[in-house]
Image: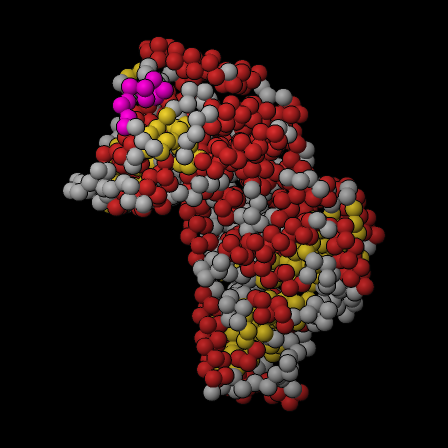
Amino acid sequence: MNAIIESSQIAEAFKARAEAVSAQVERVEDKALALELVVRLLRVEGVSDSPHCGAVWAASPMVDAADRMSLEKAVPGLTFAVTRELAADAKAGISQMDFGMAATGSLVQCADAVDKRLVSTLPSMHIAILSTAALLPDLPAVIARLDPRNSAYLSFITGPSRTADIERVLTIGAHGPERLVIVLVDNLEVER
Amino acid sequence: MKKNFKQSIIDALENPKLTGALGNFSVAYRASRAKAYEGIDFEALRNQIVTIKSSAAAHFDELADRFAQVAEAKGAKVFRTDNPQAVTDYILNLAKERGVKNIVKSKSMATEELHLNKHLEKAGFDVRETDLGEWIIQLAGQTPSHMVMPAIHMTKEDVAEVFSEKVEEGQAADIAKLVRFARGKMRPKFLEAQMGVSGANIAVAETGSIVLVTNEGNARLVTTLPNIHVAVVGLEKLIENFKDVAPILTALPRSATGQLLTSYVSIISGPVPNTDGTPKELHIVLMDNRRNEMAHDPQFKEALQCIRCASCLNVCPVFRLVGGHVFGKVYTGGIGTILTAWFDALKECDDIQALCIQCGNCKEVCPGKIDIPGLILELRRRLAVEQGIPLIQKAIFAVVNNRRLFHSLLRAAPIGQFPFAKGRFIRHLPMFLSGLTDGRSLPVISADPFRDRIKKIEQPKCKEKAAFYGGCLIDFAYPEMGEAIVKVLNKAGIEVIFPEGQTCCGAPARYSGAYEVAAQNGVDNIQALLEEDVKYVVSACPTCTVALKEDFIHHLRAVGRTEELPKARQLSEKSVDFSTLAYQLIEQGRLKFKKGIEPTQFTYHDSCHFKRTLHAEQFPREMMKQAGHELIEMDEADMCCGMGGSYTIKQPEISAPILERKLVNIEKTGAPLLVIDCPGCMMQIGGGLHARNSDVKVRLTAQMLADCLE
């Protein structure tokens, strides 16, 4: 019971911080609802098999071969075979994150595989899926869980890309995505 | 001072776009920084950073060895050199060997230090800065004016003009559109580049990692899309352990931009696969360029604790007026002055070191806890040793150091100033001195200094005695302040003596780098003030009090006169500023407020040394409130008034607008009374208010207390 309350509090804290840096946070009960939500988001975004309307999904532990097939069928234009050309041309990119950091609303990912970085940087929308159980309180807790000996590219993402280089005016959407949707999934089995 | 430097200051001051942008930012920054640090113990955090960075600086060679070993075991190539030219050659050769044509860069101050772009462009490579601000100044052919916000000096209109002229005609001055335009133009460049060049914010020896911090996402693309990645890393970025990334990453975004974390942080520890499946060719250049030499300098090793957040620029009252370009070099602001002296040459900071007003704002916010004003004074001292002190200043010190001559000249002043004096103020001085009275009246040198007046005061005989240290301003310009102090201390049963042998506190010499002179001032004062056995040595000038408490010791040590140190310490222990002592006496019940004091609204100006060195800023506020008066805080109460001792004489063009802003903040409160604790600020602010015919009265805490104590 205590663990549930705790996880709920940390999820609330994470959501508040992520929203404060212009991310959108949606929390769902399980994997099936998460996939449903992603499909809906992609359709609303206008993802299709027309030119410049695709979506790219980087390999993630929660999605198996059967899921991939049904997702590609549900959303024409969506592919799991990520290349730099497809990613550069896509409207949306989807990937699964390894940790969340509540204190700053950040996502943390072991991103050695280049497709993970392509889908979260090149398209104008990034959908990040994160298990609620993978939320950690703060930077020291996250750093303690990371080991650069096992990962050559550790990546933190906090909100969509931004710049304030002209007149100090905050502008969302610089070289990376201008929209970040975080799908927080309860009851998601993750390898820890 | 070189003529073109003076002109560059005037140009900057007369550029309303620049002063407007920087002025607005400095206000917004203060608030966002404070909010970002909510719930964080800043002192504990920066102590942690000091430990991490100072221990790294003490072991650069070992850490660089270890970093190279670990990173190379993972497949990176590490190139170490102390020669900046060798870094440029390494990158040029690599690019040529690999048949590179297009290079994308994410922001790196280390490569700015090398002027790498210029060299690469000259060799025929297409080099793109990808950080928006860096790209704008690259197109405009300028250098960054700020370490974190390189194009802060430009408006959207300027940017639209640069884009229209250099990239594509017809760009509108609309920020969102300009950003989208830049994204669109840059994207193909990312995709076609064969080489990416980055810096690093942190390098970890234990794991061979480099940490990159950006908001735009450009560093992610620079390190992901091209098949070759070259990171140019200054040795000072090295830390020993991976866990120590946490405190630095906690402070850097908060201090730099008031963010809890930047949009992207990448921790790269060895080559990763490219998009074509080949492994990334990762080159890490560890660049010395005098950093190791700096680490062996007992004073300047401290500067290696810098994490390049630029908060010292953001809180600087001078930087927000003149911006970065007057510094003329890659690194700007307070820390930039120090880095320029090392990475370029000591003589290169000859002009820019004089911009520092010594207010201490930067020292208070520095996450590396670097005593930036102290190090700038040390630069001044070394410059004075290397180049000598200008003749005019030497002549002044000869006078100041000769107590009799100094005092007899000050005594003669009332006669000389007569034609210009109007009441208690001088409004206009002729010829080259006229800058002194621009926008500010000067106090008239009293014909009847405090050293004479005190003899006429009938004091009760008391068991406790205090020696009063007047300092030049109270003694010769504001003797009535001294009288107020005697009155208050007498009420507490303390008799005040004025040791005749006291002389200049040495601040003018100290702030000009003439430590021998300052040390001799110290010795003369120590002798005079310890001659009679007193319980306290009291001063009402914060600069003087700091001299008595700290600087004499510092100067004597600096010039090797260690035999004088025990007495200097004795004096330090006895010395106290007036308001701190008065507060203690009230707490002890030795001073009591009168009943039925007419309450008045007042505002309070924090004098730099009073707040940031003596930490006494709450005492006068508290005493005034206890007396029944109502405090209305002004905006930026602790921002310097622009006096800065002789700064107002050396840099009148900068001092004047700093004062102007202070006066506006005072008047905005609507309070009829300003209370301060420094006769220097009294001279600057009181003179400023007088010159604009303001009704606001200015009084020292001591004068207020003299009227409202029993």
Looking at the image, residue B615 lies above or below residue A55: above
Residue positioned 43% across, 29% down in the render? B533
In the image: residue A129, left or right of residue B588: right
Of all residues shown, which one is farthest toward the front? B463
Write down the quadrant of residue B410 in the picture.
top left
Q: How far from the left and from the top, in percent, is residue A3?
A: 50, 83
Kindly identify the residue that appears in the image at 58 percent across and 56 percent down.
B48
Task: Give the color scheme: rainbow, by chain, secondary structure or one colour.
Answer: secondary structure
Query: Total number of numbered labels?
Result: 0
- Which residue: 23% across, 31% down? B695
Front residue of B324 and A161: B324
Which residue is at the far left?
Answer: B596
Could you tell me residue B272's position as x and y percent?
A: 74, 67
Residue B142 appears in the rendering: no
Would you place residue B434 above or below residue A148 in this image? Answer: above
Write the start and end of the magenta stretch as one range: B450-460
| Viewer-side residue, B466 vs B373 | B466
Seen in the picture, residue B316 relative to B218 is either above or below; the reply is above
In this orientation, which residue lies closer to the viewer: B583 or B493?
B493
Please state the horizontal and vertical placement of residue B102, each as a whole percent of the image.
72, 53
Q: Is residue B29 left or right of residue A39?
A: left
**Residue at point 30% right, 43% down?**
B586
Task: Locate the C terminus of chain B by quadrant.
Answer: top left
Residue situated furthest right in the rendering: B97
Figure quadrant of the N terminus of chain B: top right
Using the rendered image of the protein, determine whether residue B586 is visible from the camera's viewpoint.
yes
In reply to whether residue A145 is colored magenta, the answer given is no
- Mostly what secondary structure, the magenta segment? helix
Q: Position of residue B265 (x, y in %)?
A: 61, 62
